[in-house]
Structure formats: C-alpha cells, structure tokens
Image (spheres, helix red, strand yellow):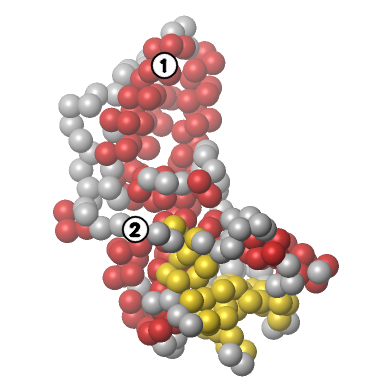
Amino acid sequence: MKQLIYAAYFLCILFATGSHAASFDCTKASTLVEKTICSDAKLSELDSQLMQSYKKALASSPDASGMKSAQRTWLTGVRNKCTDAACLNRVYTDRLKELSGAEFETPTLSKEPESSSASDSNKSPVEIALAKNATKISALGFSNKWLKAPIYLRGDAVNPPNHFVIFENLLAMLFENPRFSKITAIKSGKFEGFRLKVKGAESSGLLFRFDEGDLFISHVVGGDDELTPLETAMDYVSLSMLVVQLAPDAIQRVK
C-alpha cells in the first residue's frame, strides 16, 4: 500500500509540473468553455490571473455592486460565447487589460467574439485534438479496440466505476498538453498503457486492463519501470482523479 501511495504521489508531482490551476475546480468542469480552459495550461493561467485582478479591482472599486454585475455580464455574454481556445485567449487578455485600467467599463454584448476557424466552430476540443494528433496516436501502435474502448473511472470507493474517457480521446488531449515532452506506449503481458515524460523529471505512466471491451486502470508505472498494482477501491479513486485532471474535456458520463 505504501508503495502505491508513493507511486501515485510521484504521478501527481509529474502531472503538476509546470501547470497553472484555473480559478475553479476543473474536476467539476461541465461546459465547453470550462473544459477548454482546464485543458489548456495558458488559459488556466489566464483564468487564475483574471480572478486575482478582479478581486483586486473589486476591493478598490467605489461601486462593488456594479463591478460584480459587470463581471457576470462578461462571463455570460462574452467569455461563454467563445467556442475555441483562441477566442478565450483573446477575451481573457482584453478583460485583463480592462481590469488593470484606471477606469472600469461594463463589457458590451453587441458583438459576439469570433472563433479563429469557422470550420472548427462546431467541434469540441477533443474532436479538434483527435484530428490534429491522428498520426501520433496511430504511431503508438494500439489496436483499434483499445483506442475505441472506454476507460472506467471511480468517483468514490462505494459505487462501481461509472465515468469513462475513451482511450484515444485521452491520448489526443495528452498530446495537446505542453507539459509532456514525450508520450510512449508501454506493454506488460496483457496490460497496455502509456508513459509520460516531463522535462527535468523521471517518466511515469499508467497501465490498463482490457475486459470485454472496457478498460480499467491496473498499475502505476514508475520511472524505474517498476509496476505497482492498484490494491484498494481508494487507490482506484485516486488514480481516477488523476485522469480527470489530465483531460477533463474527454470525460463523459455513462448513460
């Protein structure tokens, strides 16, 4: 048990290296905008910076009520109209400039932010990442049944696994994460998975067990290739939360 705790702790450090947390809990992200922010390190940092700037401006504003109303207007009428990361980057940058200015102006709703690509305007971040990284995913060598299989995750130690992320969707979002300098496929007997490398840290990864079309986390892989199996329900919950933090965009609930 101590061995798994150490391995999971190592993974947490690895995945957190160089990251910037958003101002909200990414494990509870539910909208396209929230998921896009959580999957992009730069946007997460901008979101955190904006919250700090907003709190600072609110504290010094002679009209706190007006400030709060203007921020709600910006969130619902400007930020939440974005459909891609480029649009979010633009409106966050503009909003930061507004909040740091000498005078505060209520955001206008007269013009909806434009997306960077009309062809991608109706696509989710996962769909865009899949198309962009199709060659890289194929090069990993996983079979189609593995790529299309859902990974079942646990939200608690009582109920059975009921959340999943499609394996290829997870891989696509990992390739989009700038923290990982290298992603490789690993196999050990009947188990398969991936190893992630962050510059300045040992690589580490996860192995999965294939069971009649479904995937379940089976082992943590340390930097020395040591395999540490999951032993308890709480071990599974902890690793499930890691996957959720890695690629919130790809998470879906089993119907």
Looking at the rendered image, the quarter that the N terminus falls into is: bottom right
Does residue 171 appear in this view?
no
Q: Residue at x 33, y 76 (%)?
A: 134
| Mark 1 vs 2: CB contact within 8 A | no
Q: Which residue is mark 2?
A: 125
- Residue 219 in percent (x, y) is at 66, 76
Q: Nearer the viewer, residue 200 or 165?
A: 165
Tell me if residue 199 comes above or below residue 99 in the rendering: below
Quarter occupied by residue 70: top left
- Residue 50 in percent (x, y) is at 46, 33
Q: Disc 1 on helix, strand or loop?
A: helix
Label 2, residues with CA under 10 Å away: few <14, some 14-19, many ≥20: many
Q: Nearer the viewer, residue 190 or 98?
A: 190
Label 1, residues with CA under 10 Å away: few <14, some 14-19, many ≥20: many
Query: Which amino acid is tagged 2?
Result: Pro
Quarter occupied by residue 254: bottom left
Left or right, residue 158 beside residue 244: right
Looking at the rendered image, the quarter that the C terminus falls into is: bottom left
Tell me if residue 226 comes above or below residue 180 in the rendering: below
Distance from Cα at disc 1 to Cα at disc 2: 31 Å
N-terminal of the pair, mark 1 or mark 2, is: 1
Query: Which amino acid is tagged 1?
Result: Met
Q: Looking at this view, name the residue that lies furthest to the right.
A: 2
- Residue 146 in percent (x, y) is at 44, 82
Tell me if residue 3 comes above or below residue 108 in the rendering: below
Rendered image: mark on residue 67: 1
